Amino acid sequence: MKNFLILITILFCVFHVTGQTTSFQSKFSSEKLAEAPVKLIPFPQHVNWNKGYLKLKSVHLVNEEFLIKPIKNELISILHEAHIEYTNIPTSIPLQITKNPNLPSEGYTLKVISNSITVGFGDDAGLFYAFQTLKQLIKNINGIPYIQYCTIEDYPIFPLRGFMIDVGRNFQSISILKQQLDIMARYKMNTFHWHLTDNPAWRIESKKYPELTAAKNHIETRDPGMYYTYEEIRDLIHYAKQKQIQVIPEIDMPGHSESFVTSTGFKMESKEGLKILKEILVEFFTEIPKELCPTIHIGSDEVKIPNPEGFMKEIISLCRANEREIIIWNPGLPADNQVIRQTWEDKPQKKQGYREIDSWNSYINNGEPYIHISNLFFKPIGSESKNTVLGGILCLWPDVNLESSTDAFQQNPVYPSLLTYAWKTWTADITSASRNYITQVPTIGTDENKYFSIFETYLLHHKDRYFNNLPFQYSKQAETSWSLYGPFKTTLTDSLDNNLNNFKKMPFKTVSGNSVYIRDRFQQGGVFTKAMPGETYYAIAKIESDTDKIVPFWIGFETPHRANRVYNGIPKEGSWDSSGGEIWINGKKLPAPNWENPGWKPSKTKGWGSKEDQEIPWRIEELYWTRPPVAISLSKGTNTVLIKIPGTTDYQNWMFTFAPLLTEGLNFIHP
């Protein structure tokens, strides 16, 4: 048997690992971030921390006339929340506001010393963001508010820092959208991209064509008849403006328009459909003037039509006649270089003279909670483009039917992604990093891992402080360490299961992270980029525990993308994984959950999901972070975890997740 296993090793244990050829560069050092006494997100461009704290029981404003009403209300709200009295008493701490026209757009300065706070600003946005930083600086010690002495000069690198929600497929109430705007503003994001129309439904009031919003013309499972009145749209835009956020409505055309066709009887690109579409746009521009909505997004992606140049020219001319800036998806239909492109495809963008918004690899629904954060963090905004990059927009596409509108935030790591993206688009700290981190967490011992580990402390600090009542699907992972073995022919692996002695002399690859891709669905990477169906890999971790304890873990294998209900399905009863994955803890097989729908599979396992499957809401048991954590007994000392990860299809999101949700007293031993 020993010789047989050696033969298996020689024949099949060949590593296919992408080389990390791009050097890591960041304008902040790990030490600078680690030593900061306050974990600010996003981190300021320039900050000096001084010893001591300012006790802040009450404040009065100096040069109050510089504050417009919404910003003054924001400041009062921040002070009230921190239990700091806003007063006119001159003996209280002065908060002095000074205008500085030399500051960059949206920039500010903030100085805290022993007897005062001074804020400098060049525009209203800069003043608003200074107060957001002030909010994070306030620390409560024994019921008394304090602020660390510091001097900050800060400004964004990118002028556009955005978040998109698709409400065409699944409706979101105005109150839920305002909640997102509140969170965006807190982290200095300034653009809300509102995807208002799509195949299932048209969500914009139309006085001339009310049939567009009629329930009978919407997919019956997709909140039929739910739409926004012009008054509600204006209200949301006004609310956003108070938060220094511009709203960019998107009316997708001529693709993604089945609801339009159902309602009017015409395709948008037809003579009759184009006439109706232009009338709808004129009505929209009349109801939502350029002062409220200077920019319109007209989609144009994923569609083939006769004479695309003619269609786009007519629509663009109409938008410009109404003095609107125009954005389209890229790739999309042809347009002149004055039209802004929002890039979503993984292709380097050659210099073509247009302005560009980076949304490549920024779809939250295509990521799972752990690797997606590494992907967002290490990808420099606009790094693949030779054009003028304005910034980036983080996108949420819950294509699959939602049982509840809030499921979009339960089923996707929205808030960890949002904070990471806010950091990236403001600071632009990382200027160079390996593309490997699209699908991997940096390995322990690298500069990247050290930097990422420190960033995690920031993320988790904000989770604990601000997101107690909201889903925040993240736990520390930079120090999680695995040894990966393989590939082995799946048909020859029985003798390896739960037999650690067989792995002792085998070569292995060391990786880090709570989730590990063998190879991702889109084949952008993974630890073994040439892994093939019919192969099996094993992962081993050794976890030191300070005491006997029960620890909750998120555990899973293939994680489906929430936009597309295509994967290998729910495992059979008694199994962890539809592809045959298994787990052993200290030599004992870990029992699988009791599945409510054991063995269920979507009708398709590759390509785009069927219409029938797309209408089935995600079940709690289908995503490792929505089902209950698994309680695992760990012994004092060293505990060994062995995971078997077989591959069965080309389209498989070939991976595993083993994530401790409480890490105090635990230490992964790095081999």
Image (cartoon, rainbow, N blue to C red):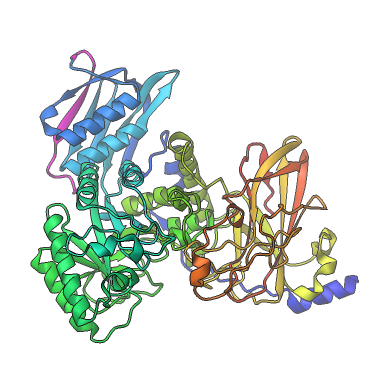
Q: Is residue 530 above or below residue 516?
A: below
Inspect this view and state whether residue 138 appears. yes
Q: Is 201 in front, or is 486?
A: 201
Q: Is 550 in front, or is 580?
A: 580
Asked if residue 325 lies left or right of residue 183, the reply is: left
Residue at 72% in and 52% down: 594
Asked if residue 355 lies left or right of residue 567, the reply is: left
In the rendered image, residue 595, in percent from the top left (x then y), is placed at: 69, 55
Inspect this view and state whether residue 159 appears. no
In the rendered image, residue 482, in percent from the top left (x then y), is placed at: 67, 56
Per the rendered image, the range of residues in magenta is 89-105
Residue at 57% in and 50% down: 626
In the rendered image, residue 642, in percent from the top left (x then y), is placed at: 75, 57
Q: Is residue 601 magenta?
A: no
- Count of numbered circles in the view: 0
Quarter placement of the C terminus? bottom right
Residue at 50% in and 55% down: 448
